[in-house]
Image (cartoon, rainbow, N blue to C red):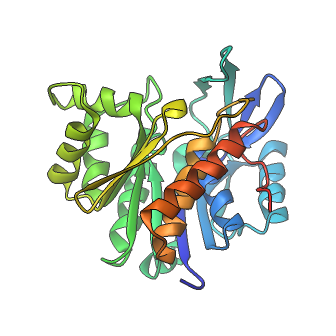
C-alpha cells in the first residue's frame, strides 16, 4: 500500500538509561520505526516548555517524523523515565507523573487525519489520566471501519487499571502484548489455565479482534490471526538492552499488514528488526539497510 497513513497516540519522553538518556515512549518508538519502514506517520503527543521538550521535537524532525501534532505545555515538564537494566538486559522503569503527555488533547487536524488513517496505535500507559484517555477514545472512534486499531498493552505498575484496559480493548481490533502481560491480564480477567493459545483465543473472541500479536522474548513470537497461530523462533543475538524491541516489532506487523505481506514474511521481518534493536543501546536505532 502506497502512502499508508498511520496515527500514533501517546507518550514522548526520555529514557534515562545507565548509558545516558535516549528518546523513548512506546507510541513514539512505534512511530519512529513506522517512518523508517516508509509510512506517512503522525504522532500526537505533548512536551513541556523546556529544553528536553525542544530537543525531542528537533530529534523527531531530524528523522523526518512530523511534529505537526505535538503541543507544548506551559505547566508540566517533558516526560522522563528512569530505566535500570538487569544482568540480561531487561528494563525496570520508574515513570514520573504529572508530565506533559498526561494532558494530550485531540485537535481538529488530528481528528481529520484519524478519519483517513489506515491504522492507529495507542497504548494503555498514556491512558493513566482521564484527559489522555478521552483523547484516545475520541480519535480511535474517528478512524474508518477498515483501519487497524492497535492496542499496545503496556502494563507498568502502578498504572494498571482493569476498567481502563477493558475500555481500550473495546476500541481495538488488534492487541499487542508480551507473554508476561498475557499471563497477567488472563489472571485479571479470570481466565483459567496457563496455555497461551487459550488465553489469546479468549480475548480474540471476547473483543472481536482481528489479530493478537504476542512477543515472548528469547522464546520467539506468535501471531494469532484468522483462526491460525503463526510462530517464529527468536534469533540468537548478544543483547545490549531490550528497550523498544517490542515497539519495532509492532511497527513491522502493522506496515506488513497494510502492505499485504504474508504472515510468515511479517514474522520474519518483525523478528529481524526487533533483534537488531536488542543489539543496540536505547529504543530508536536506525535500521540497517
Residue at image point 27% right, 56% down: 228
Residue 201 makes an appearance in the image: yes
Q: Position of residue 161 (x, y in %)?
A: 32, 32
On screen, 19 above or below 139?
A: above
**Percent x, y of residue 100:** 62, 45
Quadrant, the C terminus: bottom right
Is 54 placed left or right of 270 in the picture? right
Inspect this view and state whether residue 24 appears: no
Q: Using the rendered view, name the quadrant where residue 255 is placed.
A: bottom right
In x, y percent, where is residue 43?
A: 61, 62
Along the viewing direction, whichever of 137 and 244 lies nearer the viewer: 244
Q: Position of residue 193 (x, y in %)?
A: 17, 25
Residue lying at the far top in this picture: please name it: 87
Tally of numbered tags: 0
Q: Quadrant of residue 246?
A: top right
Q: Establish if 122 lies above or below 107.
A: above
Residue located at (46% from left, 35% from top):
216
- Nearest the viewer among 248 and 122 is 248
Identify which residue is drawn at 46% across, 54% down: 122
Task: State the residue at coordinates (78%, 48%).
Answer: 285
- Image check: 192 left or right of 20? left
Residue 23 vertical placement versus 216 (above, below): below
| Snapshot quadrant of residue 192 | top left
Amino acid at each position: 500500500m502506497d502512502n499508508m497513513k498511520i496515527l500514533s497516540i501517546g507518550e514522548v519522553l526520555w529514557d534515562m538509561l545507565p548509558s545516558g538518556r535516549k528518546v523513548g515512549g512506546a507510541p513514539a518508538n512505534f512511530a519512529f520505526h513506522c517512518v523508517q519502514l516508509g509510512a506517512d506517520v503522525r504522532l500526537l503527543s505533548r512536551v513541556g516548555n523546556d529544553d528536553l521538550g525542544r530537543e525531542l521535537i528537533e530529534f523527531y524532525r531530524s528523522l523526518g517524523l512530523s511534529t505537526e501534532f505535538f503541543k507544548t505545555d506551559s505547566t508540566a515538564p517533558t516526560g522522563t523515565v528512569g530505566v535500570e537494566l538487569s544482568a540480561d538486559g531487561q528494563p525496570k522503569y520508574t515513570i514520573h507523573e504529572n508530565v506533559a503527555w498526561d494532558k494530550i488533547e485531540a485537535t481538529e487536524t488530528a481528528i481529520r487525519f484519524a478519519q483517513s488513517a489506515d491504522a492507529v496505535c495507542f497504548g494503555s500507559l498514556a491512558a493513566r489520566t482521564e484527559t489522555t484517555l478521552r483523547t484516545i477514545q475520541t480519535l480511535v472512534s474517528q478512524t474508518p471501519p477498515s483501519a487497524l486499531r492497535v492496542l499496545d498493552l503496556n502494563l507498568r505498575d502502578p498504572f494498571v487499571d482493569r476498567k481502563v484496559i477493558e475500555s481500550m480493548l473495546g476500541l481495538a481490533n488488534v492487541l499487542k502484548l508480551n507473554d508476561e502481560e498475557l499471563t497477567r491480564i488472563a489472571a485479571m480477567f479470570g481466565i483459567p489455565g496457563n496455555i497461551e493459545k487459550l488465553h489469546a483465543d479468549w480475548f480474540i473472541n471476547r473483543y472481536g479482534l482481528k489479530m493478537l500479536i504476542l512477543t515472548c522474548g528469547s522464546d520467539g513470537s506468535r501471531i494469532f490471526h484468522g483462526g491460525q497461530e503463526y510462530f517464529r523462533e527468536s534469533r540468537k543475538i548478544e543483547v545490549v538492552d531490550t528497550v523498544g524491541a517490542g515497539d519495532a516489532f509492532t511497527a513491522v506487523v502493522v506496515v506488513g499488514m497494510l502492505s499485504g505481506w504474508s504472515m510468515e514474511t511479517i514474522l520474519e521481518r518483525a523478528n529481524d528488526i526487533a533483534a537488531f534493536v536488542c543489539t543496540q543501546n536505547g529504543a530508536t536505532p536506525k535500521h540497517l539497510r
